[in-house]
Image (cartoon, helix red, strand yellow):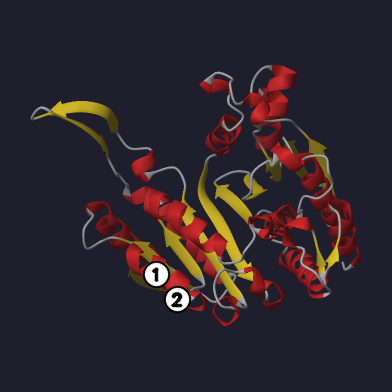
Amino acid sequence: MAKNIVVIPGDGIGEEITAAAVQVLEKISQKHSLNLEFAKHHAGGAAIDLYGEPLPKSTIDAAKQADAVLLGAVGGYKWDNVAPHLRPEKAILGLRKELGLYANLRPVKVPATLAEYSPLKPEIVSDIDIVIVRELTGGIYFGEKCESEQRDGVECAWDVEIYSEPEVERIMKIACETAQKRSGKIVSVDKANVLASSRLWRKTVAKVVADYSDVAVSNMYVDNCAMQLALNPKSFDVIVTSNLFGDILSDEAAVLGGSIGMMPSASLGDGTGLYEPIHGSAPDIAGQGIANPIGTILSGAMLLRYSLNEEAAALDIEKAVESVLAEGYRTADLYREGLKKVSTTEMAALITAKI
């Protein structure tokens, strides 16, 4: 039976990097008899130009019916001055809402061949392999807020952090299922010594993990976690945390690898999963053939792992990427003297040849 993958190139370098990922996925589909089929749809600035809106209904419908969605990137200078409701970035928020995506998975993996690019010492970051599971639709970002009010003659603004037990339960289940594919160890990050919402979070985490005999959870305050990510990142495997804390910690962790061009992500929920690199659309280098496609290619590996449950195929892609990097091939963002500079399409071809 065919597996239908909706590909949304988006804007800027999106066309180049998604084409590279599809090339790799087509090869892996042949090798593992996955019968993957790809259909391209539009979102972001490209959709504004074609349809007058960032997320047309045809894209939403196709995404809902697909087995998975692979996204490039959206946005660019061209659409900086459009009305707020038409901004290209609304496509991402719209897809998350329409697909019911509430969990963001951000892997941070630093092979020894890339440790030199990290701002930390190679011995600290070499062979890091972390997944941060961030709650995506709750917490302070979506709570009640006030932009301005007077209190005792002073202007104030406020935001409310609210989490319900079901919201924490479902993100914790995703974290447990992720840990089951790995070492079975989770660090749950909160601020339970100060925040009531964190105390509910911690209590609910303990209740959920009781149903997973092969998973162990420890708790850590967010300030300590931020420090340990810099001092001892190898101590982590799976981190699960709230929307606000996950937003901050995942960006901190992304720096460990030295290049956001390498970083994939997955957004999961009860329906179709959405997979995309963490970097932007980079309109300044679009069409030049120098964009790094590896973050998108590795997002394709996550697609295989989490939406199609094809672990062996996912590992084949990850091993192919590591092999090409070990041989010294680099796109412009990672190139240094003594290495071999390649274009976007050349990098995709090298990785494909390793599968």
Residue 297 picture location, percent across and down: 75, 56
Q: Nearer the viewer, residue 223 or 194?
A: 223
Residue at horizontal 28%, vertical 60%?
191
The amino acid marked with disc number 1 is Met
Residue 151 picture location, percent across and down: 12, 30
Q: Residues within 10 Å of mark 1 (few under 14, many from 20)?
A: few
Kindly indicate the quadrant of the structure image that contains residue 339. Answer: bottom right
**Which quarter of the rendering shows the C terminus?**
bottom right
When the figure is inspected, residue 21 is found, relative to residue 323, above or below; the finding is above
When the figure is inspected, residue 36 is found, relative to residue 205, above or below; the finding is above
Residue 50 picture location, percent across and down: 75, 20
Indicate left or right for 239 with 125 as reference. Answer: left
When the figure is inspected, residue 108 is found, relative to residue 299, above or below; the finding is below
Indicate left or right for 181 with 331 as reference. Answer: left
Residue at horizontal 59%, vertical 20%?
82
When the figure is inspected, residue 292 is found, relative to residue 272, above or below; the finding is below
Q: Residues within 10 Å of mark 2 (few under 14, many from 20)?
A: few
The reply to whether discs 2 and 1 touch (Cβ–Cβ < 8 Å) is yes
Label for residue 227?
1
Q: Nearer the viewer, residue 73 or 331?
A: 331
Q: Nearer the viewer, residue 105 or 179?
A: 105
**Badge 2 element:** helix
Residue at horizontal 63%, vertical 71%?
110
Report which residue position mark 2 lands on.
Answer: 231
Indicate left or right for 314 with 228 as reference. Answer: right
Residue at horizontal 38%, vertical 37%?
142
Specify whether residue 174 is in view. Answer: no
